[in-house]
């Protein structure tokens, strides 16, 4: 492992400063952090928005400390230090939380969701219907509809103080989000030439590319029709933007940036469009349909955006550290597809020889193996994890601004679930 400089910032905070640079998420731009100055809008340690007040950080290396107890020492005032002692990871959420607990909160609305989606995607063309229903087999985690429904409940409770019941149009958004997601996966497996998803053959593998594309379009058309029936122009604009983002994100993934400095931004933009936009805008849509004010709509959107980015960063990490059996799909797939995700992009800062490989999309014999070895030797996975934790923490910070309710707590725990997921 390359040398890692270690710092402390009060007993609770664990943080690792890596030899070159770590990129942090700030509101709309990304900054670099060199380990000497902190001129970011969000403190990289505690994620509080202190606008230069933390600067300069007084770093004190404690090279002998074991990795698990690393932290950062700052020159903050005592109150800032207390803020800073909040852990980067969400380990403080120790209460027993399972996805099942969250499903219970939305059981009534959730129990018939799949059946209702099947009704929306029924067809007199039996084969088309079979393909459209193929992934609606209860094997997915249904993270998206669950998040959307919990967000609807949280917003409704925040807005009305007592009634958190999910409104019919909000439930329709949960269905639409799952339908768009399913359609995009069917298409994605054609683009990625994947034969396995969720431990079973893909639509493309069973029915071929042409029928897979048509079935994806069919699901999308039914989702669009359900969206139009809501008769809410604002929501139609928000959700149709998601479809545009998905296509643009997938398109962005087909290309690489020649300029090394632009690569990380390109990756993050692509990640937002391909993964986070759907959940961010679905959360936004249920807040709109709950008649929430603009501030709450923004909170809902930003929670979804950050949880979506966390989800994809963890997915990109799992592609390097997990195995096919656990994931139910092939791992190290990204490199084989020519994709440089966060672990590789971070690793390239330590091992510049990765840059030409990234440019040629790992197309030469031996590139994939060499890149995988370099990522393993580097701190790429650790840095990607730190970035995922920052987005996770931002998602928690967002939702904590809404009134406390069981659904709001479930949304907080969901962040930890996504961060700690193994598949
Ligand atoms: C999975 O990516 C794919 C997506 C999240 C979106 C794919 C989007 C399109 C194909 C554009 C068309 C959109 C619609 C709505 C039809 P991945 O390959 O990184 O994940 P995987 O490992 O699960 O395949
Ligand atoms: Mg894929």
Image (cartoon, helix red, strand yellow):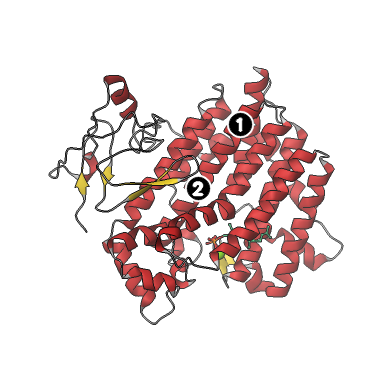
Mark 1, residue position: 105
Report if residue 135 is visible in the image.
Answer: no
- Give the quarter of the image for residue 100: top right
Point out which mark residue 18 bears.
none
Left or right of 150 on screen, residue 415? left
In the image as oriented, which residue stretches furthest toward the top? 161
- x and y percentages locating residue 124 in the rendered image: 87, 62
Find ligand 2 in the image and state its quadrant.
bottom right
Report if residue 335 is visible in the image.
Answer: yes
Answer above or below: position of 422 versus 149.
below
The residue carrying pointer 1 sits among few (fewer than 14), some (14 to 19) or many (20 or more) residues within 10 Å by Cα, namely some
- Taking depth in this image into account, of 374 and 175 the one nearest to the observer is 374
Closer to the eye: label 1 or 2: 2
Task: Tell whether label 2 touches label 1 (CB within 8 Å).
Answer: no
Q: CA distance from mark 1 to mark 2?
A: 25 Å
Mark 2, residue position: 309
The residue carrying pointer 2 sits among few (fewer than 14), some (14 to 19) or many (20 or more) residues within 10 Å by Cα, namely many
Q: Residue at x 47, y 31 (%)?
A: 397
Mark 1 vs 2, N-terminal side? 1
- x and y percentages locating residue 99 in the rendered image: 53, 40
Q: Residue at x 21, y 51 (%)?
A: 4
Disc 1 secondary structure class: helix
- Give the quarter of the image for residue 148: top right
Answer above or below: position of 298 versus 23.
above
In the image as oriented, which residue stretches furthest toward the bottom? 365
């Amino acid at each position: 492992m390359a040398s890692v400089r270690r710092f402390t910032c009060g007993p609770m905070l664990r943080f690792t400063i890596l030899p070159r640079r770590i990129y942090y998420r700030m509101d709309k731009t990304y900054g670099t952090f060199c380990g000497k100055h902190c001129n970011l809008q969000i403190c990289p340690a505690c994620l509080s928005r202190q606008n230069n007040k933390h600067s300069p950080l007084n770093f004190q290396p404690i090279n002998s400390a074991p990795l698990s107890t690393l932290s950062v020492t700052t020159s903050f005032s005592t109150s800032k230090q207390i803020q800073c002692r909040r852990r980067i990871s969400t380990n403080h959420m120790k209460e027993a939380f399972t996805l099942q607990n969250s499903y219970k909160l939305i059981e009534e609305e959730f129990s018939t969701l799949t059946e209702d989606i099947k009704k929306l995607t029924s067809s007199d063309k039996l084969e088309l219907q079979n393909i459209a229903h193929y992934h609606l087999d209860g094997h997915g985690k249904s993270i998206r509809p669950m998040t959307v429904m919990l967000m609807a409940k949280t917003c409704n409770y925040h807005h009305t103080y007592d009634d958190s019941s999910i409104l019919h149009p909000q439930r329709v958004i949960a269905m639409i989000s799952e339908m768009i997601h399913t359609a995009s996966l069917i298409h994605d497996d054609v683009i990625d030439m994947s034969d396995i998803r969720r431990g079973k053959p893909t639509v493309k593998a069973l029915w071929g590319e042409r029928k897979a594309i048509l079935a994806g379009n069919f699901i999308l058309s039914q989702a669009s029709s359900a969206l139009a029936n809501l008769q809410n122009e604002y929501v139609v604009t928000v959700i149709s933007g998601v479809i545009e983002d998905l296509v643009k994100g997938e398109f962005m993934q087909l290309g690489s940036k020649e300029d090394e400095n632009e690569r990380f931004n390109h990756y993050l933009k692509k990640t937002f469009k391909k993964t986070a936009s759907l959940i961010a805008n679905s959360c936004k849509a249920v807040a709109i349909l709950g008649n929430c004010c603009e501030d709450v709509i923004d909170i809902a959107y930003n929670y979804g955006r950050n949880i979506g980015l966390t989800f994809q960063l963890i997915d990109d990490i799992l592609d390097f550290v997990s195995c096919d059996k656990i994931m139910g799909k092939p791992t190290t797939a990204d490199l084989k597809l020519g994709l440089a995700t966060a672990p590789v992009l971070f690793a390239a800062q330590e091992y510049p020889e990765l840059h030409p490989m990234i440019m040629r999309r790992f197309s030469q014999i031996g590139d994939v193996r060499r890149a995988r070895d370099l990522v393993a030797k580097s701190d790429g996975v650790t840095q990607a994890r730190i970035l995922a934790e920052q987005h996770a923490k931002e998602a928690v910070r967002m939702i904590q601004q809404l009134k406390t309710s069981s659904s709001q707590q479930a949304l907080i725990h969901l962040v930890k679930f996504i961060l700690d997921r193994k598949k």
